[in-house]
Image (cartoon, coloured by chain):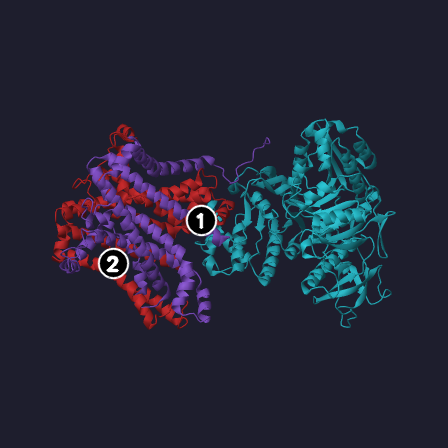
Chain colours: A purple, B red, C cyan
């Protein structure tokens, strides 16, 4: 308002340098993330909404989507239970090999997903050490739906554990001890005190593993066998359509998967913000 | 690692008998069931396949293992993977540090919150879609195709496209690892450097960077690991031209397709081993940072 | 002059955290900025160092205008509250950093570093890392680091805040010694008075972004220029009293007013400061070798080693009231500091004692700031008359806002006659009166606003017949919604204010209404009736009577009411007002209205307990109901009363 405009609040004497940096970072992020995403979305809708729906209504595409969501949901549920349990065991108990176990939890993040697939095929494949046993019982794991879930469980193994662990380590030791002094046994104590405290983190971890499972490709492409309408998941479907030069079909499925992931991301962000508000309040 | 684990346990044991400094108790008989479930699950899901792979890769002997990895195709795949990972890591490190610094320090960064949210997207996007995005972008009718043509660069089915794809899928690691550290160390040390006459660049190099070192190293390793292991995105954009655009993962993919199990298992084993090296390094960084 | 600050302003989110601060610090001076946290003192320091950029004003260091220079080019030494040592560098590297940046040769660097480490008493610590040092040692390193490149000024931001008391004392002495030996101009920011007094050549007291006063420590303590400083620095007994015949009397103490103060000789414009050591206490009048203030009761004794501090509550003195008011307390609570003697003749707690004053300091008080809004309605004249009386008796400063046609109106003419021109500002302009009033309220912190009322039947009448420009009329309803300070809505037939009805009907006893009501009544010369209306539904039967029929619950309620009324009365009497109390049972609004008629009250004081006051909703709000239905002036008290 006044003649002397308020000056910059930061002590910057070379605004050019800063603007250069900002420009470079924005360009980098725009080129790497925003433009490609927009391009895919544009391509998906380029032939109109009707064509978009037609691509998705194709039974192969639709079944792939159903399978993907179902497998991801199962994965998330299993992770929620066993991940929370594992985190609790790691945080609360002392047993031989605990340290090694703890450091190896992150292994699925470090191992290439394709290698994961190979490993699972080697072990659970029809000629694998465990696979042959299952095979003899008439249960097929590899090139069948159980294999998909198994692969997803492997690659998403750390999510829930790593979400819950810090909460357990930092939080309510005192509350727990207070509960013990009040005569609660371990199970009551776990249910009443520990569980409510870690449930939000476990939920976030489960959502993360769900999101990750939706997009998983490398392990599944090896494990699933990719039989249309039976073991073909959405990402593999997209890959097939790209190879077949059906860009529209690939785009339509991509848009759906993107929408799902973004939705999950927003949900996670919202939960985190809300929790921060509650705790920070 | 076993050693550090033992020392950690020792530390706890020397603390209070029942609940140590870290608050861990020896499980009571009934509780062994819980511990057992957790262990059994981890063994069946994680470690058994790993052991099976090792056995599979070495089933024809150590010699066959190394032979499978020293064919020209395998060597070129390893080299390409290494180059891609190195390139993607370099790009993501430089820009990642800049982006993280701006997101934390520059309160007037235009669209800060939006950009902050956008950074997570590569984690949420399926790698296949990431590769497909480049096909759309640089394909015949793509938005950026004219640009690439004008520059005379072949993007798709060539190194540049693979590099972009790898960079995309490993983009958030450095930023996400650094940002909390930047926030934690605060601005005051940088301010102290300014008042002592240091310029922005100087303050960054000698004050900020050492402060975020552990996070940066961790992020770099994560980026590298992710880049090495990427398959979906690269598969889509590379065209898998043997000896030219075939990475280590694509080599496995093809070997399995061609029922060349030994080569596939050997390469998979190599990648698994390399990720163990990275994992160990990461663990070491974590422990060092914690001991500070 | 090493440091010259001129009209510095810094705003965050539109709020001025540093407001027009000007300051000169001499060469080699140790200057301390003293203020509570959030007062803006650190911001000033950061602006000097270049870590924050002022929105207005200039900063000159050693004759060089550095306002727009980045911190790198200012050559200031800055010591941060949390030390901010470079944690990955050794102590030696930390100290050498500034020298390294300025490309000082290695040998010179090493020599300088060793000198500085020796100076701060850390010789031989060079190879350690900051985390291996204690907090006090870290802060010494920070000082050495700041001094390394011979800065032109040394700036310290609460440098000892995070340390324990003993270390703090040691570091203070070390700092003082270093500062004197290097003769470096220094500004230190602190909230700790003791620290300020021990270190400073001069102290600047800062509050809410304003630099209140700059003076040497002794002067600041003995002769502060404002009440705020007086009470911020050290223990203070501050009392206010009207003056008469060129002097002020408190008990037997007579304080002559300075000659030039003639024009200011009005009630409430002077305060008297007694430091605890200025006062003496003794068992009898005769034993006091000082003018007697009065007799009182010892309420508390605190041993301080070399001395002993008494809290004595004097019996009420007519016309004298404490500036730090406590609700529900009568009389004057005074802190008296006595030397501890072996044969202590000090009275015990609960005993009577006489208090006398050996010394005092006279302070001019900031006058009340009143705002009067006038338009062409008849109620404006009433508002102006009430306002005039308060302004004259309280010695207030008055601002009048009105329409352009008001220049010759009787209220304005009369105000010009009765108030000195220095205390009166009249702003008459075309149109937009309500908007102007709101802007003025936003800009200036007024104590009290006088408004003409136009509600109820009055409003109807105005709407019906009168012409004249609508935007030259005071829309009291509009203003009331946003007005942050107490306002007096003048309405009804003009009358002499002899009796004021103070309502505490709405829930909790409103302490602010009682205090402001007391002040207003005092300046109007009126007596106060303190009314409590106990909300009782008529269907519950007759109001509870004292006596055997009374239930436990009602007896308790009655006891509670009586206690809080008693407190209110004590407060009122402590402020020098004649007061009585009443309890009524029933629906609050109608009971208040009934009391107004029965008791023939001339003004109503009521607290508004909401942030916004909607006077246009009489059916929903007690305050609005009163304004609409009582044809008497209503003082609506909201917000904080600062005086």
Mark 1: secondary structure: helix
Label 2 to label 1: alpha-carbon separation = 33 Å
User: Depth check: C418 or A251 in front?
Assistant: A251
Closest to the observer, C625 or A211:
C625
The answer to whether residue C85 is seen in the rendering is no
C140 on left or right of C290: left
Label 1 Cα crowd, 10 Å radius (few <14 / some 14-19 / many 20+): few
**Where is the N terminus of chain A found, in terms of image quarters?**
top right
The total number of labels drawn is: 2
Horizontal side, residue B265 vs residue C535: left or right: left
* C275 on left or right of C292: left
**Which chain is mark 2 on?**
B
Q: Which residue is mark 2?
A: B45
The percent position of residue C117, horizontal first and vertical second, equals: 52, 56
- Which numbered circle lies on residue A273? 1
| Residue B132 position within the rendered picture, expressed as x and y whole percent measured from the top left | 26, 38
Q: Please tell me if label 2 and label 1 are on a single chain.
A: no
Residue B44, relative to residue C384: is it above or below?
below
Residue B152 visible at all: yes
From the viewer's side, name the closer residue of B68 and C69.
Answer: B68
């Amino acid at each position: 308002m006044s003649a002397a405009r308020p000056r910059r609040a930061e002590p910057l004497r070379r605004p050019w340098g800063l603007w250069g940096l900002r420009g470079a970072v924005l360009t980098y992020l725009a080129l790497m993330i925003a433009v490609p995403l927009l391009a895919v979305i544009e391509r998906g809708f380029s032939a109109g909404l009707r064509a978009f729906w037609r691509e998705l209504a194709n039974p192969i595409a639709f079944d792939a989507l159903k399978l993907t969501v179902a497998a991801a949901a199962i994965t998330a549920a299993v992770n929620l239970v066993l991940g929370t349990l594992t985190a609790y065991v790691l945080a609360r108990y002392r047993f031989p090999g605990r340290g090694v176990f703890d450091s190896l939890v992150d292994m699925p993040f470090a191992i290439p997903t394709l290698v994961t697939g190979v490993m699972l095929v080697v072990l659970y494949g029809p000629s694998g050490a465990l696979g042959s046993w299952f095979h003899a019982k008439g249960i097929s794991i590899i090139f069948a739906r159980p294999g998909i879930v198994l692969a997803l469980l492997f690659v998403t193994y750390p999510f829930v554990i790593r979400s819950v662990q810090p909460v357990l380590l930092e939080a309510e030791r005192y509350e727990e001890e207070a509960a013990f002094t009040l005569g609660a046994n371990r199970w009551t104590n776990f249910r009443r005190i520990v569980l409510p405290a870690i449930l939000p983190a476990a939920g976030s971890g489960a959502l993360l593993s769900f999101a990750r499972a939706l997009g998983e490709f490398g392990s599944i492409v090896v494990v699933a066998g990719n039989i249309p309408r039976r073991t073909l998941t959405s990402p593999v479907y997209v890959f097939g359509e790209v190879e077949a030069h059906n860009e529209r079909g690939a785009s339509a499925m991509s848009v759906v998967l993107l929408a799902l992931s973004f939705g999950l991301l927003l949900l996670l962000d919202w939960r985190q913000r809300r929790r921060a508000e509650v705790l920070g309040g | 690692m076993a050693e550090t684990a033992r020392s950690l346990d020792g530390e706890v044991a020397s603390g209070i008998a029942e609940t140590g400094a870290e608050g861990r108790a020896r499980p009571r008989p009934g509780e062994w069931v819980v511990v057992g479930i957790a262990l059994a699950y981890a063994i069946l899901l994680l470690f058994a396949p790993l052991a099976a792979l090792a056995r599979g890769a070495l089933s024809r002997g150590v010699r066959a293992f190394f032979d499978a990895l020293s064919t020209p195709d395998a060597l070129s795949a390893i080299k390409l993977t290494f180059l891609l990972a190195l390139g993607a890591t370099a790009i993501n490190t430089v820009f990642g540090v800049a982006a993280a610094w701006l997101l934390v320090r520059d309160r007037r960064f235009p669209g800060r919150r939006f950009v902050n949210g956008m950074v997570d997207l590569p984690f949420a996007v399926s790698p296949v879609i990431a590769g497909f995005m480049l096909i759309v972008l640089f394909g015949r009718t793509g938005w950026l195709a004219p640009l690439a043509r004008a520059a005379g660069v072949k993007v798709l089915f060539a190194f540049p496209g693979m590099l972009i794809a790898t960079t995309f899928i490993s983009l958030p690691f450095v930023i996400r690892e650094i940002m909390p550290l930047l926030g934690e160390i605060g601005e005051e040390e940088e301010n102290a450097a300014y008042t002592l006459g240091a310029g922005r660049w100087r303050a960054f190099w000698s004050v900020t960077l050492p402060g975020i070192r552990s996070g940066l190293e961790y992020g770099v390793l994560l980026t590298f690991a992710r880049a090495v292991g990427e398959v979906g995105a690269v598969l889509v954009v590379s065209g898998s031209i043997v000896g030219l655009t075939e990475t280590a993962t694509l080599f496995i993919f093809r070997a399995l397709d061609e029922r060349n199990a030994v080569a596939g298992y050997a390469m998979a084993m190599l990648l698994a081993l390399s990720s163990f090296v990275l994992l160990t390094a990461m663990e070491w960084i974590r422990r060092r940072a914690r001991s500070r | 002059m090493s440091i010259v600050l001129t009209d510095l302003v810094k705003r965050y989110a539109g709020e001025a955290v540093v407001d027009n601060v000007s300051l000169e610090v001499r060469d080699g001076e140790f200057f301390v900025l003293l203020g509570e946290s959030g007062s803006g003192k650190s911001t000033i320091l950061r602006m000097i160092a270049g870590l924050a950029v002022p929105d207005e004003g200039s900063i000159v260091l050693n004759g060089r205008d550095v306002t727009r220079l980045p911190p790198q080019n200012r050559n200031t030494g800055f010591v941060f509250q949390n030390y901010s040592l470079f944690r990955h560098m050794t102590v030696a590297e930390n100290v050498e950093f500034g020298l390294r940046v300025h490309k000082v040769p290695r040998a010179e660097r090493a020599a300088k570093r060793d000198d500085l480490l020796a100076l701060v008493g850390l010789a031989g610590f060079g190879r350690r890392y900051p985390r291996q040092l204690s907090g006090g040692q870290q802060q010494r390193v920070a000082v050495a680091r700041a001094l390394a490149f011979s800065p032109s000024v040394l700036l310290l931001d609460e440098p000892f805040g995070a340390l324990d008391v003993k270390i703090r004392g040691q570091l203070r002495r070390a700092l003082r010694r270093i500062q004197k030996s290097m003769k470096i101009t220094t500004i230190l920011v602190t909230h700790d008075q003791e620290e300020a007094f021990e270190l400073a050549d001069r102290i600047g007291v800062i509050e809410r972004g304003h630099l209140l006063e700059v003076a040497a420590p002794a002067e600041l303590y003995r002769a502060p220029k404002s009440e705020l400083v007086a009470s911020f620095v050290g223990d203070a007994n501050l009392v206010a009293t009207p003056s008469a015949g060129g002097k002020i009397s408190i008990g037997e103490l007579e304080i002559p007013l300075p000659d030039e103060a003639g024009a200011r000789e009005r009630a409430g414009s002077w305060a008297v400061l007694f430091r605890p050591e200025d006062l003496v206490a003794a068992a009898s009048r005769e034993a006091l070798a000082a003018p007697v203030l009065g007799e009182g009761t010892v309420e508390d004794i605190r041993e301080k080693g070399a001395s002993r501090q008494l809290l004595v509550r004097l019996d009420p003195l007519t016309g004298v009231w404490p500036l730090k008011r406590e609700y529900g307390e009568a009389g004057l609570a005074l802190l008296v500091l006595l030397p501890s003697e072996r044969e202590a003749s000090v009275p015990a707690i609960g005993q009577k004692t006489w208090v006398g004053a050996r010394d005092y300091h006279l302070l001019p008080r900031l006058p009340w700031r009143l705002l009067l809004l006038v338009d062409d309605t008849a109620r404006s004249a009433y508002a102006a008359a009430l306002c005039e009386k308060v302004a004259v008796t309280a010695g207030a400063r008055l601002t009048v806002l009105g329409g352009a046609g008001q220049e010759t109106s009787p209220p304005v003419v009369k105000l010009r006659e009765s108030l000195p021109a220095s205390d009166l500002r009249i702003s008459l302009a075309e149109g937009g009166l309500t908007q102007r009033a709101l802007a003025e309220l936003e800009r200036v912190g007024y104590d009290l606003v006088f408004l003409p009322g136009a509600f109820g039947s009055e409003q109807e009448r105005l709407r019906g017949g009168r012409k004249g420009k609508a935007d030259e009329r005071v829309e009291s309803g509009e203003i009331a919604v946003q007005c942050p300070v107490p306002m007096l809505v003048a309405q009804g037939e003009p009358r002499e204010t002899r009796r004021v009805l103070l309502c505490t009907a709405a829930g909790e006893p409103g302490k602010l209404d009682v205090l402001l009501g007391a002040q207003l009544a005092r300046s109007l010369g009126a007596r106060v009736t303190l009314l409590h209306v106990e909300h009782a539904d008529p269907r519950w039967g007759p109001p509870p009577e004292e006596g055997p029929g009374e239930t436990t619950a009602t007896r308790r309620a009655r006891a509670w009411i009586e206690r809080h009324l008693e407190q209110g009365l004590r407060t009122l009497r402590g402020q020098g007002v004649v007061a009585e109390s009443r309890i009524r049972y029933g629906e609050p609004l109608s009971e208040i209205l009934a009391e107004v008629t029965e008791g023939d009250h001339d003004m109503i004081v009521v607290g508004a307990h909401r942030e916004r006051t909607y006077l246009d909703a009489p059916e929903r709000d007690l305050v609005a109901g009163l304004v609409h239905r009582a044809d008497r002036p209503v003082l609506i008290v909201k917000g904080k009363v600062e005086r």
